[in-house]
Amino acid sequence: MSRISRLPSSLLRVAACTGVAALTLTACGSGSGSDSASSGSGTVKVGLITKTDTNPFFVKMKEGAEKAAKENGVELSTAAGKFDGDNAGQVTAIENMVAAGVKGILITPSDSKAIVPAIEKAKAKGVLVIALDTPTEPESAVDALFATDNVKAGELIGEYAKAAMKGKTAKIAALDLAPGVSVGVQRHEGFLKGFGATDKDVACAQDTGGDQSKGQTAMENCLQKEPDINVVYTINEPAALGAYTALKAKGREKDVLIVSVDGGCTGTQAVKDGKIAATSQQYPLKMAAEGVKAVATYAKDGKKASGYTDTGVTLITDKAQDGVTSKDTAYGLENCWG
Amino acid sequence: MTATTTPPDTSSPYADLKAPTTARRLLTAPTTGPLAALLLACVFFSVSTDQFLTGGNFSLIVQQVMVVGTLAIGQTLIILTAGIDLSCGAVMAFGSIVIAKMAAEGSLPPLVAIALGLVVCGGFGLLNGTLVQKIPLPPFIVTLGMLNVAFALTHIYSEEQTVTNLPGPLTALGETFPLGHTDITYGSLVTIGLFLLLAYALSNTGWGRHVYALGNSPEAARLNGIRTSRLTIGVYTVAGILYGIAALLLISRTGVGDPQAGQTDNLDSITAVVLGGTSLFGGRGSVLGTFIGVLIVGVFRNGLQLMGVASIYQTLITGVLVILAVTVDQISRKRAR
């Protein structure tokens, strides 16, 4: 194959014609959709943009939004980034939804700061933008926020761990999310605050991305570094279950206290099975439902939702500690997601 | 290699003696399939949703593909030489953090910061090309390693922080100008300009012919007096500079320097190249094909979103199209023999 491929001139002509056609269309096209007027179909459209398509938390959030959309008689469309942190994918989704004529957008920002310019553009076109689960930076970049108070979620398990240790000296391992991601930072800080500790008291801190296999690896390494760890704070239940597997391999699963955040059904079941001591349950379905409702209200009478609405967090454990309010796993399993 | 039937999509120096008809060439040109797919998709979405066929929406699609499109130009050049670059997205991310931090927190004037970003990305390309050529190592391995190096440097240098409050010149390409009733992004023009520039260079200059020759047979190219070593390193370096331009486009599009950016762009750019009819075996294809390829992805993403279809289906369709495109490439190669 020692030939040189060259574009036939006729093909260039076709391409040129297509280009000219597109430009003509552009020049006489019906504008840039600069008004978010409702589409021809007449129903109100709501867009939901999650961080990823695959995380059960967001799958559940979508279900909550779909159910609420039916109840409120609005049409829901969804989109997501390709990976956790995919800002460009979320920007593209916002643009496409504005072009589709949505009345409001619900978004769980992958990058709290980077998404702001795109949100401002959407708001300028009269679209109501609500953040779910994760606040933007600044928080005022969106019209409203429906989220778990992640600091409080961390505090609850911190207080619980402190009470459960009953004055024993704690050797803490922290299985975190990823550097600089606000959700992870807030839970970690909250845990330390609730426990009454500082970062100096953490014997081993590792990033897991909230992933079970990475959680296991991190715990194995922590045990290598610090064999007598006895309290494990985890960013979410997959990381907690990974930690449990690593501890079990060392025969330490009975004497190490694992606490977590999320309240997914698998995680809550793990609390019931005694693998995780306690978890702070959050309510993604509620976030989505409230968000959809807010957009429906805005479409009906132009009233914009505003400010921060805490969608609540509950400590779930079957080994309740004095002085720390909690509910048992029966309640947890009834209200879990995923 | 002597072929009794010259494939119509190629032209040897003696092709003019055979002079296949325009119609026949058009039917068998490597970009015909992708172009047909793109036009069919456009027709389908125009019928399915009335928000698709507007100037504003077309401008939006081009704006959405400009970053991956610019990366894909560099990727096309490298794939034409039978190489592959897995590091493009990570190199771009590093370049964007360099530009953003230098301009926002350093004391460099914006234009100098941009130039530095281009130099840094070009340097990565130069390093890739040198390792591929001089040691030599397989491009897949070199760029896989460089992907990790660039990714780590991005996160170390940015300290995981998104860089905000950028000076105006950095985001100037994200500004729009009106054309008729439509707002066009300056960055879109840069990308289209780069596509046209590289298309011209590949089809009308000696350098371009050498790139194809190198991809078809490095040995034959060397025996014909082409300086293959310099050419390879040059191609990787040019690709690197293109990633630097993509970095600037990325900043201008999002208005920030984002260390998380570009994580799947390496595969996305390869997808665009393959959809555009360029062969992964090297020596066959074109950057205009890649432009069509990147538009196919953008049109499906935008059109399905306008229809209210979940984005996971766009991923599904893209996957099917990639396999189709490679199948078509293989069949046409068989027929060419």
Image (cartoon, coloured by chain):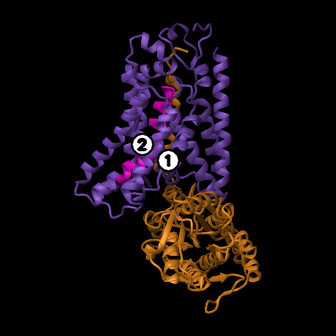
Dominant SS type (magenta): helix
Q: Residue furthest bottom?
A: A323
State the mark number for residue B65: 1
Point out the stretch of residues depicted in magenta. B70-97
Q: Determine the chain carrying the residue at label 2.
A: B
**Can the viewer see residue B237 in this picture?**
yes
Contact, mark 1 vs mark 2 (Cβ under 8 Å): yes
Q: Determine the chain carrying the residue at label 1.
A: B
Along the horizontal axis of the image, is B37 left or right of A183?
A: right
In the rendered structure, the colour chosen for chain A is orange
State the mark number for residue B191: 2
Whole-percent x, y for residue A108 in the image: 56, 68
Whole-percent x, y for residue A326 in the image: 66, 87
Mark 1 and mark 2: span between their CA atoms? Answer: 9 Å
The amino acid marked with disc number 2 is Thr
**Can the viewer see residue A127 in this picture?**
no
Please check the rendered image and state whether residue A310 is part of the magenta-colored stretch, yes or no.
no
